[in-house]
Image: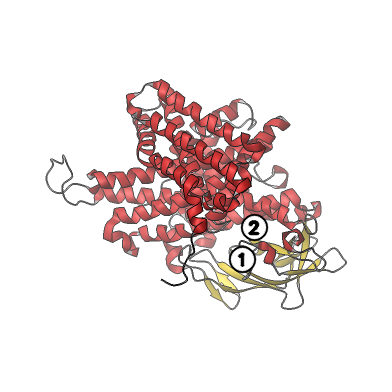
């Protein structure tokens, strides 16, 4: 079925789970109003559904083509990309002075979800470009900003992130690419980078690479890494393109999914070194790159939401049409649609509730990023930054895990037809798999959460988050609405489990860090269940109070109840795993052969 952007649920989630109405009332977004936001998302949804979505299967079947150092995108991609940039979608968050629209992160996040739901391979290119723009805005010298940002913001040029090398994946301390000072303010870059998304393509006339490399006198480890801007084509003083730089695409990868996104091996310095310019300070490149990576982690989290939404829409449409057997209570003639069978209904409810929970977490993170930049007082900005730091690893890990699980359930709903490529369900499952891996594997996100984030302010930040969730649970209980069923009690158990696991980990970090890391992944899942479950409950409560349609109110309440009574019930077991199961992992010797 064609993709239809769920704009109504996006708006409801922004309003009732991410605090949009409160932010608007506080003047956080200036003169921007709810009607403006709705209009923007409506237009984005139309472009995503009508123009980008038809590229999805074409891109999967054709893939990106590599020949003699050049990459050609699938049929139709260049035209759609050109129209997309002409409409101004690439520069939503960028500074107005440089040609952007200066819109908040919450709007850009909803749009990112739509671009990637329509086609994840299409959405990846702009995702990296926006990250590069943010890194340059924050850290580049004024002359570099003036020369490169306007055309990157317009989408005339794209950007990349060059970190990974054959021996340096998650551990960048092993990085070997070199940078030599020339003496005229430029550097010569040599080395090889792998897994570079959109490192080469024919969508734009220039590609701006952000490359990590070491100077000859750099200290060892990650403290000796610098960041450089290395364009595919050098740029003349008048802004026109000059000579080809000493950088080339050696090959592209043949991958499980996202076939139309060219994943490149890049070679720098065949002829003495690619010309590059320092971004930020020497030996402090990771600080600049992390600006790009942290924002990319929200974007990848949204990719998890997007693939889950796309898989859910397809599964729901198939289940409404496919007829097999007779469901309990089916009295009409013939076989019943499989959507009437309780087990299929359970799978579909799991898909829908999980997707909406992940969306809520991502939008909450986007709102805190806005607060960190736009709030009026330093104290409010600091609080926004702290909460965004806490939510980032949870959003990335939970949402991309959900993307994988929901896409797999989508295949299951289709039955044997899901295992056949023609239905498209298999593509969602293949495309989803990378999201839990890149931009920091989900295991690394979990370790970051446990090792760095839950200890912020001595644990006070997590304690405040737990107290906030307890307030939502109390509000559900006070509503006395029979439609919520056991939502309050089940969510109370979930939050209790999170508090128990958090206290254990805060103690284990000092005394047994291996045990803490062994429990990091189940803890991250537990945190996601608590955040997602309470967000759905809060959303349902506010929709009931705001006089929305009976159908919308019933769906929100039903999904909140389903999540609490069927998915959040895993929380006590996860807490037990965190508290008692970590040492079993540490003590286990994995045999090299069975």
Label 1 neighbour load within 10 Å: few <14, some 14-19, many 20+: many
| Number of numbered labels in the structure image | 2
Give the mark nearest the N terminus, 1 or 2: 2
Real-space Cα separation, disc 1 to disc 2, in angstroms: 15 Å
**Picture layout, residue 245 above or below residue 527:** below
Label 1, on which residue? 199
SS type, badge 1: loop
Q: Is residue 259 left or right of residue 279?
A: left
**The C terminus lies in quadrant:** bottom left
SS type, badge 2: loop
Q: Are marks 1 and 2 in contact (CB under 8 Å)?
A: no
Label 2, on which residue? 156
Q: Is residue 41 left or right of residue 225?
A: left
The front one of 587 and 298 is 587
- Could you tell me residue 416's position as x and y percent? 27, 61
User: Which residue is located at x 37 percent, y 46 percent?
Assistant: 351
- Could you tell me residue 22's position as x and y percent? 57, 27
Q: Is residue 581 left or right of residue 274?
A: left
Residue 42 is at least partly visible in this image? no
**Picture layout, residue 201 above or below residue 465:** below
Foreground: disc 1 or disc 2: 1
The front one of 290 and 456 is 456
| Outermost residue to the right | 183
Q: Is residue 482 left or right of residue 580?
A: left
Query: Toward which corner of the image does residue 62 lie, by quadrant?
Result: bottom left
- Could you tell me residue 354's position as x and y percent? 41, 44
């Amino acid at each position: 079925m064609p993709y239809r952007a769920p704009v109504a649920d996006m708006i409801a989630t922004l309003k009732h789970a991410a605090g949009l109405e409160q932010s608007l009332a506080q003047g956080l977004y200036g003169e921007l109003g709810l009607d403006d936001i709705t209009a923007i998302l409506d237009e984005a949804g139309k472009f995503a559904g009508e123009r980008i979505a038809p590229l999805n299967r074409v891109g999967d079947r054709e893939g990106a083509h590599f020949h003699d150092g050049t990459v050609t995108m699938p049929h139709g991609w260049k035209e759609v990309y050109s129209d997309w940039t002409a409409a101004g979608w690439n520069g939503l968050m960028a500074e107005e002075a440089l040609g952007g629209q200066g819109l908040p992160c919450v709007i850009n996040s909803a749009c990112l979800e739509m671009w990637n739901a329509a086609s994840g391979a299409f959405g990846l290119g702009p995702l990296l470009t926006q990250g590069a723009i943010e890194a340059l805005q924050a850290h580049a010298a004024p002359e570099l900003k003036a020369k490169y940002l306007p055309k990157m913001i317009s989408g005339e040029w794209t950007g990349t992130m060059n970190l990974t090398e054959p021996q340096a994946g998650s551990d960048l301390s092993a990085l070997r690419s070199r940078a030599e000072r020339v003496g005229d303010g430029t550097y010569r870059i040599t080395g090889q980078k792998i897994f570079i998304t959109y490192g080469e393509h024919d969508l734009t006339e220039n590609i701006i690479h952000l490359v990590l490399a070491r100077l000859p006198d750099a200290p060892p480890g990650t403290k000796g890494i610098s960041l450089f801007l290395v364009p595919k084509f050098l740029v003349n003083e008048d802004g026109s393109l000059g000579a080809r730089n000493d950088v080339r695409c050696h090959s592209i990868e043949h991958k499980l999914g996202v076939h139309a996104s060219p994943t490149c091996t890049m070679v720098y310095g065949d002829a003495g070194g690619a010309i590059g310019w320092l971004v930020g300070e020497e030996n402090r490149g990771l600080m600049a790159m992390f600006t790009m990576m942290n924002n990319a982690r929200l974007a990848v989290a949204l990719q998890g939401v997007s693939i889950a939404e796309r898989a859910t829409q397809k599964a729901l449409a198939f289940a409404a049409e496919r007829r097999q057997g007779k469901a309990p209570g089916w009295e009409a003639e013939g076989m019943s649609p499989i959507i009437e069978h309780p087990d299929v209904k359970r799978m579909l409810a799991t898909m829908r509730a999980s997707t909406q929970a992940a969306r809520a977490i991502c939008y909450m993170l986007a709102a805190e990023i806005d607060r960190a930049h736009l709030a009026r007082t330093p104290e409010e900005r600091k609080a926004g930054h702290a909460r965004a730091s806490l939510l980032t690893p949870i959003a990335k890990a939970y949402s991309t895990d959900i993307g994988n699980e929901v896409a797999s359930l989508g295949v299951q709903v289709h039955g044997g037809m899901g295992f056949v490529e023609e239905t498209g369900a298999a593509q969602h499952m293949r495309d989803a798999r990378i999201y839990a891996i890149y931009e920091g594997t989900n295991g690394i996100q979990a370790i970051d959460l446990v090792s760095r984030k839950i200890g912020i302010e001595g644990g006070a930040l997590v304690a405040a988050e737990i107290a906030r969730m307890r307030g939502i649970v109390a509000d559900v209980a006070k509503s006395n609405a029979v439609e919520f069923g056991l939502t309050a009690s089940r969510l109370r158990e979930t939050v209790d489990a999170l508090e128990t696991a958090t206290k254990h980990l805060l103690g284990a970090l000092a005394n047994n860090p291996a045990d803490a890391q062994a429990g990091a992944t189940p803890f991250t899942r537990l945190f996601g269940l608590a955040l997602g479950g309470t967000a759905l409950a809060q959303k349902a409560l506010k929709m009931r109070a705001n006089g929305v349609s009976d159908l919308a109110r019933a769906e929100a309440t039903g999904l909140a109840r389903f999540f609490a009574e069927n998915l959040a019930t895993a929380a006590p077991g996860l807490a037990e795993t965190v508290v008692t199961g970590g040492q079993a992992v540490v003590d286990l010797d994995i045999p090299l052969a069975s």
